[in-house]
Image (cartoon, rainbow, N blue to C red):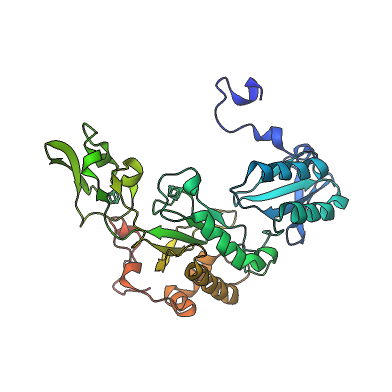
Amino acid sequence: MSESTMGPRNQGAPDYNLHLHPMMAKNYGKWDHHERLKPGVIRYTAESGDNLYVVRAGSPRTMSPATVHKICDIADRFCDGFVRFTIRCNVEFSTDKAENIEPIIKAVKEELGFPIGGTGNSVSNIAHTQGWLHCNLPATDASGAVKALMDDLIDEFEKEEMPNRVHISTSCCQINCGSHADISIIVQHHHAPRIDHKNMMICELPKVVAICPAAAIRPKMMNGATSVEVVEEKCMYCGACHGQCPSMEIRDADTDTLSIWVGGKASSTRGGPSQMKLAVWGIPNNPPRWPEASDAVRKILAAYKEGGKPWERVGEWIERIGWAKFFEKTGFPFTRYHIEDGPDALTTFNRSSHVRL
Ligand code: SF4
Ligand code: SF4
């Protein structure tokens, strides 16, 4: 990578212009329209009349070097060596030759074992947070839960039968570093962190006090040395302190559960971003296949598929029918835990004299 594109200290993301397929670079900013020829295959047509074909496959995100080599080999054979990953970890093979589409699909299925799909109104590839591979906080195996769920929903990835595209994610702790989605499975902790005072004392002044968003941690002398205590009534079991300090252990195999949040999305040309809201809580964290979580996601998808209007995202569908109908149609119980009561809740309450769901 030259210094002119990466800067003198080789930091930051590489210049993406260097990684565009030549046909994409030639028509950059001059694309006229695109069509989905079938699930997983898109044709982009430029103002010049040039066509670029994309075959999209679902990847497992966590891949061995051998798998990456196979992806690159397919890209070398059919795509002039160019390949890209989408935000949902789909892998896209681009070619300017229509006759390459079927050979790419055959190679992806036979050599990689990846499914083709994830375009248009499908359930796109299910994403998960970094997990045990890079992080010290996981309370579940997000990648394993995604594999089990994707096995269950593979037909919805390969078809385009949803009202709009559906992004699903799984997150392995409550901090949730990357699981904002239409439907999101997130770990829930149910008690304050346990403090390992013996190891906490190796810090002269425990810095973990500053990390707590609820100001629930305060310094405390233990056996003549500095440690901390947690004010249980203030603690919201978020686990932020555990990320800062290994002596604050919040994970608990006996009590941690999974929750499902719905309605999150980034902004698009049609509308602004929206935050997820709690739909189901207390789902068993049940490896290796998490059947209860898959079942709950299936119920939400079935209700959305049946009731969503064309191009309505999950959150827009719920906003239209109302939360009372959402709970009625999915069959999940509405509980007091669904009512937001945090310090910022005033900004989201319905401020009328009538309580509406
Ligand atoms: S969701 Fe939490 S545990 Fe999982 S990778 Fe992100 S920060 Fe780590
Ligand atoms: S779990 Fe969260 S709220 Fe509770 S003490 Fe730790 S940082 Fe504070």
**Relative vertical location of residue 247 with respect to residue 288 in this rendering, above or below:** above
On the picture, is 115 further left or further right than 144? right
Give the residue drawn at x 62%, y 57%: 125
Give the residue drawn at x 45%, y 44%: 135
On the picture, is 349 further left or further right than 154? left
Quarter of the image that includes the N terminus = top right
**Relative vertical location of residue 292 with respect to residue 22 in this rendering, above or below:** below
Instruction: Residue 210: give x, y in percent of width and height.
Output: 26, 40
On the picture, is 48 further left or further right than 2? right
Quarter-wise, where is residue 13 in the image? top right
Q: Nearer the viewer, residue 340 or 9?
A: 9
**Relative vertical location of residue 279 with respect to residue 30 in this rendering, above or below:** below
Quarter-wise, where is residue 29 in the image? top right
Quarter-wise, where is residue 30 in the image? top right
Give the residue drawn at x 26%, y 36%: 207
Instruction: Residue 40: give x, y in percent of width and height.
Output: 73, 58
Residue 181 in view in this figure: no
Quarter of the image that includes the C terminus = bottom left
**Relative vertical location of residue 248 with respect to residue 319 in this rendering, above or below:** above
On the picture, is 74 further left or further right than 204? right
Residue 221 in view in this figure: yes
Instruction: Residue 239: give x, y in percent of width and height.
Output: 33, 50
Give the residue drawn at x 73%, y 41%: 72
